[in-house]
Image (spheres, grey):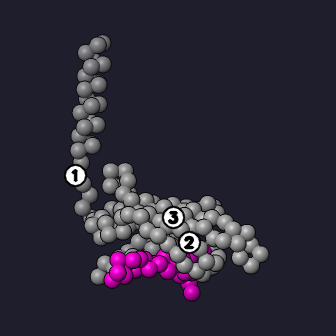
Amino acid sequence: MNWKFLIAIVGSIFIYERSSASPEPTATTWDQWRPLVGEWQAAGKGSPGEGAGGFSFAFDLQNKVLLRKSHTDYPPAEGRPAFSHDDLMVVYADEAAHKFRADYFDNEGHVIRSTADFSPDGRTLTFISDPAPSQPFRLTYVKNPDDTLGIKFRNSSA
């Protein structure tokens, strides 16, 4: 009985080791994302008003996902009290579709799933939400010549 148990354990270890040694996926590459990695300061205006804060991009899970975290503070305006906005986006490679996908979550309860794509010159990154009648969106990052990022967020049906 002890030999059967030992053989079962060794077989399990062998199977685990073999499956964890699978080759790295090659259908998509993270190279184009590397210039975004780091801490960024943000300031701007639009809806819901003028705000300031920052965001970051960082690889996680042994470089299998890219996390974007953001925090923006909005001062009181037009009778509205000050408030903060926090969000998290998880970018991952969808190897089956040969695309990058992203899942966005924020402190207001929004969950948005999207596809991410770079322009041919690699300077523009656009997230386009999956078709949803409630809130289609387009989030675009543009790498400027001075190494700043321009950001546009708009309703993609507009």
Q: Is residue 50 left or right of residue 129?
A: right
Res 37 → quadrant: bottom left
Rendered image quadrant of residue 75: bottom right
**Residue 105, disc:** none
Q: Which residues are magenta?
A: 135-158
Q: Earlier in the sequence, mark 2 or mark 3?
A: 2
Residue 142 visible? The answer is yes
- Residue at the extreme top of the image, as rendered: 1
- Residue topped by disc 3: 70
Residue extending farthest bottom:
158
User: Does the magenta run of residues contain 93?
Assistant: no
Please name whichever residue, 72 or 4, is drawn nearer the observer in this view of the structure: 72
Amino acid at pointer 1: Pro
Query: Which of the marked residues, 3 or 1, is nearer the chain's N terminus?
Result: 1
Where is residue 135? Give x, y as percent. Answer: 60, 75
Query: Which residue is under mark 2?
Result: 52
